[in-house]
Image (cartoon, rainbow, N blue to C red):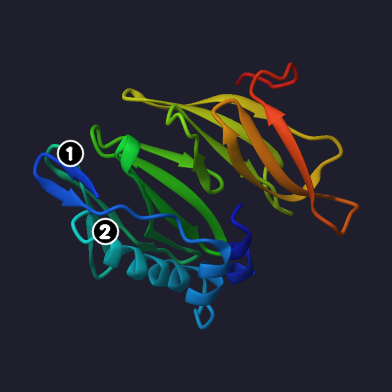
Amino acid sequence: MGHPALRLVAGVLLVAGACVASAAAPTPAEIATLCASAEGPAHCGRLIEEAQLKSLPNLARRDGDTLTVSLFPSGQRAFADTTTATTEKSYALFDYWSPVNAVVLLVNVGDDASFAILQRATGQVTDVSAEPVLAPDRQRLAVADFCARCAGELSVWRISRDGIRKELVWKPQPAWRDATAKWKDADTLVLEYTPGNATEARTLERKLGAADWRRP
């Protein structure tokens, strides 16, 4: 539930001869445009996916309630939407990180949005609470999870072939109401945030070498 635009709705890589085009994660403005007439979070996800599938025609396919993503060098991984008496869970293709051969999925459970990262080489899936942002050195990702019902933390994750592991966690005090993260370089994050008692956004640079990170 960490992507601002999603909360509003809720409330050429060549690999072994198979061409997968490059794409970028939709911006908040693009999401707002795509989902302007969406009936809810799941429908919004499908509209985002429809646009991404056009840019990534050889990466995944949609068949009814099932999204199937191709793995490398072979195989596939299916993600099926489910419905119970109390809630609905849906998956949607959101982004493709060609430098690390990973697919980012938007996961909607009721009105809550999160993300899942599928490593195509192993089929391993890592769940993260908000939109992950890949570092320029491709060795880490950052997740800024800030909203009224979020964890209120910034986390940094290490990427390896064996999986994606949470490496650093930081919780600002006093708490922030919302925030987004971008990488300035491989060792520096730029955070645009709004403190809980403020109305205007502020900007903060944070080094990975800062002493007050917590290691989980």
- Identify the residue shown where x is 79% and y is 35%: 172
Q: Amino acid at mark 2?
A: Leu
Residue furthest to the right: 197
List x then y, in percent, for residue 193. Answer: 75, 48
- Identify the residue shown where x is 26% and y is 37%: 123
Residue 203, quarter of picture: top right
- Of the pair 132 and 114, the residue shown nearer to us: 132
List x then y, in percent, for residue 8. Answer: 63, 68
Relative vertical location of residue 140 with respect to residue 70 in this rendering, above or below:
above
- Of the pair 28 and 215, the residue shown nearer to us: 28
Residue annotated with mark 2: 56
Quadrant the C terminus occupies: top right
Labels 2 and 1: the sequence-earlier one: 2
Left or right: 34 in relation to 95: right
Q: Is residue 35 visible?
A: no
Residue 153, quarter of picture: top right
Residue annotated with mark 1: 72
Q: Residues within 10 Å of mark 1 (few under 14, many from 20)?
A: some
- Identify the residue shown where x is 25% and y is 39%: 120
Q: Secondary structure at mark 1?
A: loop
Q: Is residue 193 visible?
A: yes
- Identify the residue shown where x is 58% and y is 38%: 183
- Of the pair 98 and 197, the residue shown nearer to us: 98
Q: Are marks 2 and 1 in contact (CB under 8 Å)?
A: no
Q: Nearer the viewer, mark 2 or mark 1?
A: 2
Relative vertical location of residue 61 with respect to residue 98 in this rendering, above or below:
below
List x then y, in percent, for residue 201. Answer: 80, 54
Q: Secondary structure at mark 2?
A: loop
Q: Amino acid at mark 1?
A: Phe
Label of residue 10 in the image: none
Query: How far apart are the alpha carbons under marks 2 and 1?
Result: 15 Å
Relative vertical location of residue 213 with respect to residue 33 in this rendering, above or below:
above
